[in-house]
Amino acid sequence: MNSKTFLKPKFIAAVISILSLVAFCFYSNEARKEIYFLCGNYGAGDSLEHVVKQLNTVNLSEFRMENLAQGKRITHSSKLNFHLVSCNIQFNHAEKVVAVSHG
């Protein structure tokens, strides 16, 4: 390869695309690990306040809280994983964790 090959737009576009894909994969994996790590911190009997306090520290993921007939549910997921990796935390009316599941 000579120096003119490295200056061609197709080569530059290919290199940028590959580097972008590598960066996306890295951050996507970090978001996945963030979800699983935080979800592993919760167990039956933990308070809603304790869970929300920890979830407020997330960088690469997000969570949303829903009010249900049985209590509340928090769904923790990431756009970087297209919300395919998630954690569901169920609370009773006393705002204590009842169940934690990975989805």
Image: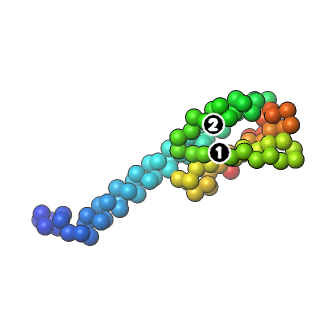
Residue sitting at x 24%, y 69%:
9
The amino acid on which the numbered mark 2 sits, given as a three-letter code, is Leu
State how far apart marks 2 and 1 are (Cα): 7 Å
Which numbered disc, 2 or 1, marks the residue that appears first in the sequence?
2
Residue 30 in view in this figure: yes
Residue 102 in view in this figure: no
| Number of marks in picture | 2
Q: Residue 77, percent across and down?
A: 62, 48
Residue sitting at x 18%, y 65%:
7
Number of residues whose C-alpha sits closer than 10 Å to that of mark 1, classed few (under 14), some (14–19) or many (20 or more): some
Query: What label sits on residue 55 in the rendered view?
Result: 2
Side of 16 relative to 88 (left or right): left
Q: What element carries label 2?
A: helix
Q: In which quarter of the image is the N terminus?
A: bottom left
> Taking 59 as reference, is 7 above or below it?
below
Side of 101 relative to 58 (left or right): right
Q: Residue 73, percent across and down?
A: 76, 44
